[in-house]
Image: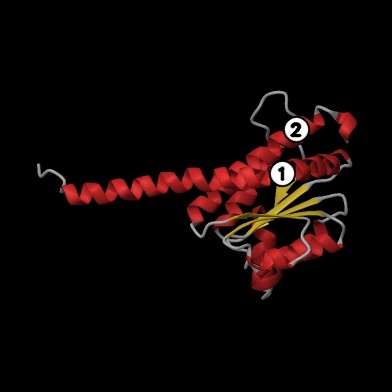
Amino acid sequence: MKEPDKADTSALDVLVARRFEQSMSVPARFFENEAGRIAEVCLAMARRFSQGGRLIAFGSGAQATDAQHVSVEFVHPVIVGKRALPALALTNDSATMSGLLAKGSRDALFVQQMRVLARSQDIAMGFTLEGKDCNVLDALKLAKDKGLLTLCLTGGDGGFCRENEIDYTFVVESHDAFVIQETHETLYHVLWELVHIFFEHEGLL
């Protein structure tokens, strides 16, 4: 069996080291900078849930899986004794989405769903890799107009999310899709946990 070339293994070591460095340093910097705002939005979310609100999550492509993941986290708590909270991912409704696509509504899928489903006490959480997904941004604009608490989880420089009146925009300052998604996943796990902590101190709500 031929032994691996030392140059090849050296390049691989560098690649792995860079990947680990990004996966640790970017989230660490993000959470250090955003800790205060994360606590603030969790209190706001807990208050919405206590008023009968629901979490409505959405995103296109790979970000649709984040919307589905966060909705499952809230509906099916992984920690015994934590209450289930109402949440849904718009991308789970394949019949509605495929029907809208068949009618040519390609750029307003989430807007049309939000127009029908959203209530003023709800929470809208949109995922967009670099803040340039108009389908997500337009739905967040509509949600804001309807009185929902709005969150945008994005990356890069924030794109158009920074230019819109979204209540909370969380930007992972990286152009690496993997690092952005890893940080978003950790973020919504933290959101879930802190929302439940606030529920355990109901005097705050």
Of residue 201 and residue 146, the one placed in the foreground of this image is: 201
Looking at the rendering, in which quadrant would you find the C terminus? top right
Residue under numbered circle 1: 38
Circle 1 packing at 10 Å, graded few (<14), some (14-19), many (20+), is some
Residue that lies at the very extreme toward the left in this rendered image: 1
Which quadrant of the figure contains the N terminus?
top left
How many numbered circles are shown?
2
Using the image, determine if residue 121 lies above or below residue 107: above
Q: Horizontal and vertical percent for residue 196? A: 75, 32
Q: Residue at x 17, y 47 (%)?
A: 6
The extreme top residue here reads: 81
The picture places residue 132, in percent across and down from the top left corner, at 62, 68
* Marks 2, 1: nearer the viewer: 1
In which image quadrant can residue 162 be found?
A: bottom right
User: In this image, 186 relative to 124: left or right?
Assistant: left
Q: Is residue 75 above or below residue 116?
A: above
- Local crowd size for mark 2, using a 10 Å CA cut-off: few (<14), some (14–19), many (≥20): many
For label 2, the SS is helix
Work out whether residue 123 or residue 5 is closer to the camera in this orientation and state it. Answer: 5
Q: Which mark is residue 196?
A: 2
Q: Position of residue 194 (x, y in %)?
A: 72, 35
Residue type indicated by callout 2? His
